[in-house]
């Protein structure tokens, strides 16, 4: 290992001498939940957050240890602001804020969405968080949430797995953190509670929430697919006490999984064959698309991989192009992955598997 890489390792581990650990970093942020006397409780069937760390890999095995000086200098302006913005988000969980309002006027949502779009958000939707979307051993301050997405550059992501794609993903997370903090500040200024997620990781299953909010549909690769970004996106949430969010219960994008059932390009493209041929029900209303143990080591050795994202037709051709060619196909399979559909929002209705 070069001196440059040793210095980078020291910076990434904050001088602890241990292997860099995203899981440990997220655990530090999660400790802020101790500032709350009560939290929205998870469901008995809730799943734990998927770990990022590979237990079998040493730091010298990971792609971060092999970055050149030029690459390190290139990514630091993204990584440092990302950590600072995530810390800023976590600091809002100090338990000190007291909301003065719980219902908002329609004009407030117009202003909030305008702010989000100007800051770089591609889409903004709203959801009541089902208890089974809260990760095991976690909790959230309020059960209502604003869900936002940002787009990642098509050309950069097409190079995955690569340093260029890794840097694009990191930039997406940084943008999410910045946007989430700006929106939370605006919401609090108007008297509402606002607790942004940590951009990556988080306390809830972001893709699950985004589908429930009607932003898109979860594909066979486990990623959200939307009209604006295809699969080239990142998701964040802001938990709030606003009880009259303009929640939509219809999702016009579920045809996507019919296409996935015929396409399966992500399954064929996966370097370690970690994507299941057919998603498996998890028992919590969601689905398991990937064998994470098979995925994780390759992910941590190859710039966060993202081959499935890059190879997805929705990322390359785009949502509208795929839909125009696929719509009306009488041979399309009618497979539906079991998910919780909030109709009404307060109830839990599990969609049946149709074949």
Image (cartoon, grey):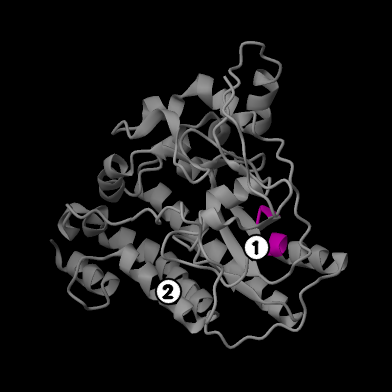
Q: What numbered label is drawn on residue 29?
A: 2
x then y, percent, for residue 256: 61, 30
In the image shown, does 22 or 281 lie closer to the viewer? 281
Kind of element beneath mark 2 = helix
Please count the marks in the image. Answer: 2
In the image shown, does 36 or 235 lie closer to the viewer? 36
Query: As drawn, is 204 to the left or to the right of 98?
Result: left
Quadrant where the C terminus is found in the figure: top right
Residue furthest to the bottom in view is 96
- In the image, residue 195 sits, relative to residue 113, either above or below, namely below
Q: Residue at x 82, y 70 (%)?
A: 104
Q: Residue at x 27, y 40 (%)?
A: 294
Q: What numbered label is drawn on residue 145?
A: 1
Query: As drawn, is 257 to the left or to the right of 112?
Result: left
Q: Is residue 335 visible?
A: yes
In the image shown, does 64 or 347 lie closer to the viewer? 347
x then y, percent, for residue 113: 75, 62
Q: What numbered label is drawn on residue 246?
A: none
Residue furthest to the top in view is 331
Is disc 2 surrounded by few (<14), some (14 to 19) or many (20+) residues within 10 Å?
A: some
Cα distance between the residues tagged 1 and 2: 19 Å
Mark closer to the chain start, 1 or 2: 2
Is disc 1 surrounded by few (<14), some (14 to 19) or many (20+) residues within 10 Å?
A: many
Q: Is residue 125 magenta?
A: no
Q: Residue at x 55, y 84 (%)?
A: 95
Which stretch appears magenta?
Answer: 116-124
x then y, percent, for residue 1: 13, 61
- In the image, residue 289 sits, relative to residue 204, either above or below, namely above
């Amino acid at each position: 290992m070069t001196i440059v890489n040793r210095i980078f390792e020291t910076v990434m581990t904050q001088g602890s001498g241990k292997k860099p650990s995203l899981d440990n970093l997220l655990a530090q942020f999660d400790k802020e939940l101790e500032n709350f006397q009560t939290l929205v409780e998870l469901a008995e069937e809730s799943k734990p957050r998927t770990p990022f760390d590979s237990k079998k890999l040493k730091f010298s095995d990971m792609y971060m240890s092999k970055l050149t000086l030029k690459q390190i200098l290139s990514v630091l302006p993204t990584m440092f602001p990302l950590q600072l913005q995530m810390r800023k988000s976590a600091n809002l969980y100090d338990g000190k804020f007291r909301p003065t309002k719980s219902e908002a006027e329609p004009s407030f949502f117009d202003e909030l969405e305008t702010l989000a779009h100007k800051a770089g958000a591609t889409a903004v939707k709203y959801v009541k968080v089902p208890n089974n979307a809260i990760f095991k051993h976690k909790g959230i301050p309020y059960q209502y949430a604003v869900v936002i997405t940002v787009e990642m550059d098509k050309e950069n992501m097409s190079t995955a797995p690569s340093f260029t794609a890794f840097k694009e993903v990191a930039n997406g997370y940084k943008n999410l953190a910045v946007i989430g903090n700006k929106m939370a500040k605006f919401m609090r200024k108007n008297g509402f509670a606002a607790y942004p997620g940590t951009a990556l990781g988080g306390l809830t299953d972001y893709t699950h929430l985004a589908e429930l909010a009607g932003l898109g549909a979860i594909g066979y690769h486990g990623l959200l697919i939307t009209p604006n970004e295809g699969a080239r996106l990142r998701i964040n949430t802001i938990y709030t006490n606003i009880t009259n969010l303009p929640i939509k219960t219809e999702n016009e994008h579920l045809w996507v999984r019919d296409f996935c059932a015929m396409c399966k390009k992500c399954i064929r493209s996966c370097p370690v064959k970690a994507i299941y041929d057919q998603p498996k029900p998890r028992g919590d209303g969601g689905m398991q698309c990937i064998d994470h143990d098979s995925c994780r080591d390759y992910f941590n050795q190859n710039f966060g991989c993202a081959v499935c994202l890059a190879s997805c037709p929705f990322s390359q051709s785009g949502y509208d192009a795929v839909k125009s060619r696929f719509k009306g196909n009488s041979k399309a399979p009618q497979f539906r992955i079991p998910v919780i559909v909030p109709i009404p929002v307060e109830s839990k209705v599990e969609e049946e598997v149709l074949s």
